[in-house]
């Protein structure tokens, strides 16, 4: 029952994020349409006030650069579908650096797994994620019995089923 409740919570949270993304994209579209409407006014108004509020750069702000940034910064369709924004490469250097680190670490973990599989001569060894404990090696009992002398002393048996 707890698992079901937490799953519902996750779904509800995802729905909230999707709604926020949809609103954000709708607002961006609204700004784009407002700029198009202002740009479509060919003859300036004679009234000084109307002229100011319908002239980009006067009382109506210049939004093209910022709207262009958000148009290029991420995939709008993907954001709407998934409920979160993934910046495109080059938009956020810190995000790009984090992605690169994750890729490097994942590559090292894959290399570690392949070494463990070779060391124990068992291609069925894999990573297991149990709760908050990620990247635990899952090694069959019979493999451990046959190759017990190869188990490093710093390894800890966390569970056996």
Image: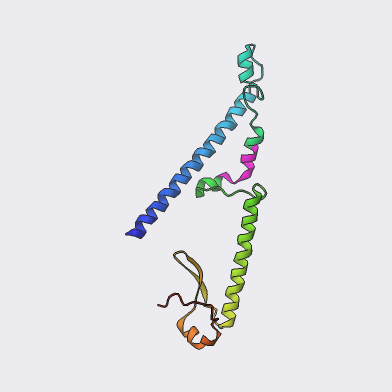
Residues in magenta, as a range: 68-76
| Left or right of 51, for residue 19 | left
- Most extreme residue toward the front is 154
- Most extreme residue toward the left is 1
- Above or below for 65 versus 115: above
Residue drawn at the location 34% of the way across and 59% of the way down: 2
| Left or right of 90, for residue 31 | left
x, y (%) of residue 132? 46, 64
The answer to if 27 sits in the magenta stretch is: no
Residue drawn at the location 62% of the way across and 40% of the way down: 71
x, y (%) of residue 19? 46, 42
Residue drawn at the location 55% of the way across and 83% of the way down: 120
The answer to if 72 sits in the magenta stretch is: yes
x, y (%) of residue 12? 40, 49
- Indicate the quadrant containing the N terminus: top left, top right, bottom left or bottom right: bottom left
- Above or below for 160 versus 22: below
- Above or below for 61 versus 1: above
x, y (%) of residue 31? 57, 31
Quadrant in the rendering for residue 122: bottom right
Quadrant in the rendering for residue 55: top right
Provide the major secondary structure of the magenta segment.
Answer: helix
Quadrant in the rendering for residue 7: bottom left
Please, which colouring scheme is shown?
A: rainbow
């Amino acid at each position: 029952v707890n698992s079901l409740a937490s799953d519902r919570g996750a779904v509800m949270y995802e729905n909230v994020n999707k709604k926020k993304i949809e609103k954000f994209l709708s607002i961006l579209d609204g700004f784009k349409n407002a700029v198009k409407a202002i740009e479509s006014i060919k003859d300036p108004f004679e009234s000084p006030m109307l002229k100011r509020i319908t002239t980009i750069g006067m009382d109506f702000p210049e939004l093209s650069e910022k709207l262009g940034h958000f148009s290029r910064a991420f995939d709008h369709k993907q954001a709407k579908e998934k409920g979160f924004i993934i910046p495109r490469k080059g938009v956020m250097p810190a995000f790009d650096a984090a992605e690169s680190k994750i890729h490097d670490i994942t590559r090292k973990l894959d290399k570690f797994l392949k070494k463990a599989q070779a060391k124990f001569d068992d291609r069925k060894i894999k990573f297991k994620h149990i709760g908050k404990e990620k990247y635990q090696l899952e090694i069959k009992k019979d493999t451990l019995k046959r190759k017990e002398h190869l188990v490093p002393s710093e390894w800890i048996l966390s569970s056996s089923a």
